Amino acid sequence: MEQAGQDPAAPQEVTRLLTERDALTRRLTGIDQRLEALYAHRQEDLSRRLASIEEAIRELSRQGVAGTTAAPAQPVAQPVTPAAAPPPAPAAPAAPPAQAAPAAPRPATAPAVPPAQPASPRIIGERVAVDA
């Protein structure tokens, strides 16, 4: 007989859930290991790039290139000299701007729209209509 309050499939369900949990744990462990390997590879790559940049800075310093004494974390800006730029072309004399005739100002009291004619009532049948 079945005990009150217990599902006869409960032990099977618990076993299935435990198995599923173990499979997910194995997957997460594998993902974690791959992430660690990718991180280590990326860190090695960045370390090599940084060493290469530092070596280039040291080489430029040995050659006496100006501006290489700055900290490696700061970019070295190369100034643009004005002599490198071509001289500006002489400006042609500009023609005086054409003088436009000023618009006649409207009087402040003049309305923009002419006034409407006063409405006149007319009788249509029994109703009174107003013409506008």
Image: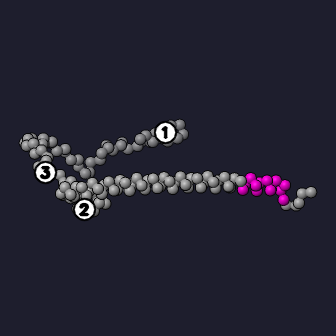
Residue mark closest to the camera, 3 vs 2: 2
User: Residue drawn at (13%, 47%), measured in percent from left and top?
Assistant: 84
Where does the image place residue 18, in percent across and percent down from the top left? 72, 56
Mark 1 lies on residue: 123
Q: Which residue is mark 3?
A: 82
Q: Nearer the viewer, residue 91 or 81?
A: 81
In the image shown, does 80 or 123 lie closer to the viewer?
Answer: 80
Callout 3 secondary element: helix
Q: Which residue is mark 2?
A: 70
- Amino acid type shown at disc 1: Ile
Q: Secondary structure at mark 2?
A: loop
Picture residue at 85% right of the left edge, 61% below the top = 5
Do callouts 3 and 1 mark residues in contact (Cβ within 8 Å)?
no
Q: Residue furthest right?
A: 1
- The mark that comes first in sequence, 3 or 2, is 2
Identify the mark at residue 114; answer none if there is no mark: none
**Do the residues under discs 3 and 2 have CB atoms within 8 angstroms?**
no
Figure check: 131 above or below 27: above
Q: Is residue 125 left or right of residue 92?
A: right
Residue type for callout 2? Ala
What's under tag 3, amino acid-wise?
A: Pro
The structure residue drawn at horizontal position 43% and vertical position 56%, both measured from the top left corner, is 43
Q: Residue at x 40, y 52 (%)?
A: 45
Q: Is residue 25 above or below residue 100?
A: below
Residue 96 seen in the figure: no
What is the magenta range? 6-18
Q: What is the distance, in whole Å, between disc 3 and disc 2 at their CAs? A: 24 Å
